């Protein structure tokens, strides 16, 4: 009888859960319909309102220095957390203003060109261990640039007899959109690697090794290391999805890892954007990001593979008992009672041994 009641109670609980889930779905659909109803062109044919030129000029002056960006994995990188955390990570909290814009993008407004250039020069940047696309915004900017991340790349393995600027430039242009190089001809023979900067298209897989022929028919394997790289698929080299969501591994994209770079015109995408923006910023995650980037900033030239030396979330060790019962009188009473019982058991054991006439010497003679 008890088993039947338990099954009945469980079935009733499941029905309640299903009912609540149905209510949530209906509410989300209703909210989407309400927004769609207001997306109509009433008023678009009215006479335009001309804003005062002085007001427009002042707004342009205040918004000259803007960085626009987007996450490479929107479902893994919360937009609100990005906007709230990045100014502090840059050391510009209270100075830089961030805002979320349509199309799952964000903007940061800087007070000066020097502050903006400092952020761009120290990039690329990541959030939640995944890369961010950041580009300087201009009124005539091609939004296609939001598919490119400027990476500093170390090239290793160029034979010394072929080391010069022209060879390095040809290698760089074969890899991607060449921006600049860092190479000292006087030290060229003593360098382990040369550094180039490329605008890397995030829709292309990363390449870590490739054969080049300096002499026809003779392959020379060059190796590439991307500075400040975070979060990429180890199977195909893409930075737009994790290894677990790779098409090669799973035979298709995961249900929640589809095309996240839409313009936000689809109702479902808009609902997901609103849900994502409603999420509260996790202070622990924000602090983690700040600590991680602080260490990177202090060691700009350190190789990215030294990641284990970065600060972790906690700076001291906490033990579960101390965390649970640090200030609890109940915990202290339980501990005292436990110690008292152990002492009582020991006394009882000694008393029984004495009563039986046993001793440590007697026990030794018996074992012999």
Image (cartoon, rainbow, N blue to C red):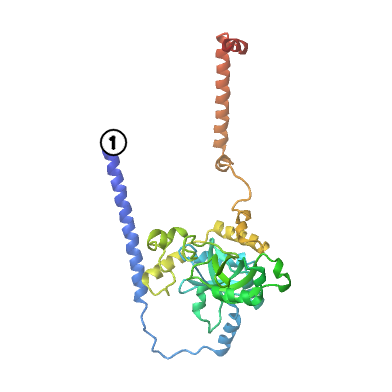
SS for tag 1?
Answer: helix
Q: Is residue 273 left or right of residue 305?
A: left
Residue 120, by quadrant, is bottom right
Image point 31% across, 54% down: which residue? 18
**Residue 315: x, y in percent?**
63, 50
Residue in front for this viewpoint, 9 or 110:
110
In depth, the one of 343 and 202 nearer the eye is 202
Left or right relative to 207: residue 9: left
Q: In the rendering, at what x and y percent does residue 330 appear?
A: 54, 36
Residue reaching furthest to the front: 217
Q: Position of residue 97 (x, y in %)?
A: 58, 72
Tell me if mark 1 has few (under 14), some (14-19) or many (20+) residues whose alpha carbon lies within 10 angstroms of its own.
few
The C terminus appears in which quarter of the rendering? Answer: top right
- Rendered-image quadrant of the N terminus: top left
Question: Toward the viewer: 175 or 279?
Answer: 175
**Residue 219, picture quadrant:** bottom right
Q: Quadrant of residue 200?
A: bottom right
In the image: residue 46, left or right of residue 228 = left
Tell me, yes or no, if residue 95 can be seen here.
no
Residue 363: x, y in percent? 58, 12
Relative height, residue 35 to residue 50 (above, below) = above
Q: Who's the residue at 35% across and 72% down the image?
A: 34
Q: Is residue 365 visible?
A: yes
According to the picture, the residue beneath numbered tag 1 turns out to be 2
The residue shown at (32%, 63%) is 26
Rendered position, 321 above or below 175? above
- Count how many numbered circles sit on residues in the image: 1
Determine the residue located farthest toward the right in the rendered image: 186
């Amino acid at each position: 009888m008890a088993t039947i009641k338990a099954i009945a109670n469980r079935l009733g609980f499941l029905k309640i859960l299903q009912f609540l889930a149905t209510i949530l779905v209906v509410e989300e659909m209703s909210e989407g319909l309400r927004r769609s109803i207001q997306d109509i062109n009433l008023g678009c044919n009215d006479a335009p309102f001309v804003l005062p030129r002085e007001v427009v000029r002042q707004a342009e002056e205040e918004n000259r220095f803007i960085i626009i960006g987007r996450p490479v994995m929107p479902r893994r990188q919360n937009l609100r957390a990005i906007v709230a955390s990045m100014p502090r990570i840059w050391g510009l909290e209270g100075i830089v203003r961030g805002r979320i814009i349509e199309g799952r993008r964000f903007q940061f407004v800087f007070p000066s060109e020097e502050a903006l250039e400092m952020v761009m020069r120290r990039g690329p940047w990541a959030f939640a261990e995944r890369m961010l696309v950041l580009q300087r915004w201009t009124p005539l900017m091609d939004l296609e640039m939001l598919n490119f991340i400027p990476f500093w790349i170390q090239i290793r393995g160029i034979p010394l007899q072929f080391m010069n600027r022209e060879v390095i430039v040809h290698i760089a242009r074969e890899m991607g959109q060449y921006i600049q190089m860092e190479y000292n001809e006087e030290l060229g023979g003593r360098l382990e690697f040369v550094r180039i900067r490329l605008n890397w298209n995030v829709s292309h897989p990363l390449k870590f090794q490739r054969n080049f022929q300096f002499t026809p028919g003779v392959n020379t394997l060059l190796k590439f290391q991307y500075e400040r790289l975070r979060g990429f698929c180890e199977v195909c080299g893409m930075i737009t999805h994790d290894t677990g969501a790779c098409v090669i591994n799973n035979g298709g994209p995961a249900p929640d890892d589809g095309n996240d770079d839409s313009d936000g015109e689809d109702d479902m995408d808009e609902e997901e954007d609103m849900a994502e923006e409603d999420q509260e910023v996790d202070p622990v995650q924000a602090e983690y990001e700040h600590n991680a980037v602080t260490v990177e900033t202090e060691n700009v030239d350190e190789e990215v593979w030294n990641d284990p030396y970065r600060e972790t979330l906690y700076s001291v060790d906490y033990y579960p008992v101390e965390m649970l019962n640090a200030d609890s009188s109940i915990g202290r009473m339980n501990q005292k009672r436990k110690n008292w019982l152990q002492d009582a058991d020991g006394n009882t054991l000694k008393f029984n041994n004495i009563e039986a006439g046993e001793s440590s010497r007697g026990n030794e003679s018996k074992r012999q």
